[in-house]
């Protein structure tokens, strides 16, 4: 019986060397292992789009080019498509070993020296990496998303936020917003847990409509939501509360017959380039603002 080919995506820089790499790794020698197809793609958002929209069994990520761009794709891939294993290609020597170790810590399942890779070796790497990753996923089953709202959970939020905090000095800054659903306990007590869940789902939709598609949005606790606004200017914090209030008003107008009233508070903390606060400290600070209702939206 023929083995189904492994669909591998090679994410690498757009250069003659990269194109030569793609050609040299094309499957050529028959093997008892599953055959594979190798599709090269640039080090950009197209790679993540392909991971989301097409069948991909395995990712080869080239770390020998711009490291920050490659690590950003790795982090986002681990959060957005955690079921797809990633093997990184590194340069020989201490630097390559160091980059490979950092990538594995960030979620890659293996690292291979790029110059030593051949078509035959790649077939083995793909096969055993997938098998090892599937076993690990079966045993681990750690999710990065909240099953009720479909947003990131606290683990997913921290994974992305810690990465972006390291790169904050290269941007105009970040903003962390913590939103709290008001009176959730009262909704649960008066109308039941299902009503409370509907309130949380409604709040998640309002928050999605408030923030940008590029922002990282999560449910981090029972009634707590967090958003990391990327590349945020000083004016960013000024528009969040009015926009959230407007989205809440739209929701209430569309659900006039609801027995409970959806309300929220929000606290915001700006992370300027050069700040060194940790994610837990920033979440606590923004949460304290929300708890004090210094920015009350409804």
Image (cartoon, helix red, strand yellow):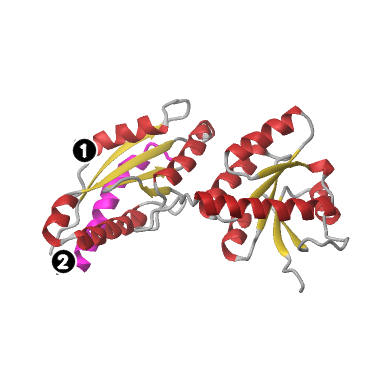
Please name the residue that numbered disc 1 is placed on. Answer: 291
User: Measuring 73% from the left and 33% from the top, which residue is drawn there?
Assistant: 96
Q: Provide residue 240's location: percent of width, then percent of height.
A: 31, 46
Secondary structure type for disc 1: helix
User: Measuring 24% from the left and 62% from the top, which residue is drawn there?
Assistant: 251
| Res. 82 in view | no
The answer to whether 93 is drawn above or below residue 258 in the figure is above
Q: Sequence order check: which comes first, mark 1 or mark 2?
A: 2
**Mark carried by residue 220:** none
Main SS class of the magenta portion in the image = helix
| Res. 226 in view | yes
Q: Which residues, given as a range, are shown in magenta?
A: 232-255
Magenta includes 104?
no
User: Measuring 48% from the left and 34% from the top, which residue is drawn there?
Assistant: 165
Q: Provide residue 276's location: percent of width, then percent of height.
A: 45, 25
Residue 118 falls left or right of residue 61: right
Residue 230 falls left or right of residue 293: right
Secondary structure type for disc 2: loop
User: Measuring 22% from the left and 58% from the top, which residue is drawn there?
Assistant: 196
Magenta includes 234?
yes
C-alpha separation, residue under disc 1 versus residue under disc 2: 25 Å
**Image label count:** 2
From the viewer's side, name the closer residue of 18 and 60. Answer: 60
**Mark carried by residue 258:** 2
């Amino acid at each position: 019986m023929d083995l189904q080919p492994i669909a591998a995506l090679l994410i690498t820089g757009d250069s003659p060397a990269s194109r030569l790499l793609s050609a040299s790794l094309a499957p050529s020698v028959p093997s008892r292992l599953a055959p594979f197809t190798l599709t090269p793609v640039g080090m950009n958002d197209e790679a993540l789009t392909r991971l989301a929209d097409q069948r991909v069994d395995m990712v080869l990520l080239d770390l020998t080019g711009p490291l920050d761009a490659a690590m950003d794709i790795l982090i986002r891939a681990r959060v957005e498509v955690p079921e797809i294993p990633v093997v990184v290609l590194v340069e020989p020597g201490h630097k390559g070993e160091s980059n490979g170790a950092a990538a594995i810590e960030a979620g890659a399942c293996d690292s291979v020296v790029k110059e030593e890779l051949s078509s035959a070796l790649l077939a083995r790497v793909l096969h055993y990496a997938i098998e090892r990753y599937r076993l690990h996923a079966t045993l681990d089953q750690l999710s990065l998303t909240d099953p009720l709202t479909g947003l990131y959970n606290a683990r997913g939020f921290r994974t992305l936020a810690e990465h972006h905090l390291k790169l904050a000095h290269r941007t105009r800054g970040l903003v962390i917003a913590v939103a709290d659903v008001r009176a959730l306990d009262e909704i649960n007590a008066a109308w039941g847990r299902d009503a409370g869940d509907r309130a949380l789902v409604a709040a998640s939709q309002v928050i999605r409509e408030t923030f940008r598609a590029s922002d990282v949005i999560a449910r981090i606790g029972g009634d707590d939501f967090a958003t990391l606004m990327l590349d945020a200017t000083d004016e960013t914090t000024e528009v969040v509360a009015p926009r959230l209030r407007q989205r809440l008003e739209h929701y209430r107008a569309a659900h006039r017959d609801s027995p409970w009233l959806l309300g929220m508070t929000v606290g915001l903390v700006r992370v300027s380039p050069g700040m060194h606060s940790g994610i837990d400290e920033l979440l606590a600070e923004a949460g304290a603002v929300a708890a004090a209702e210094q920015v009350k939206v409804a």
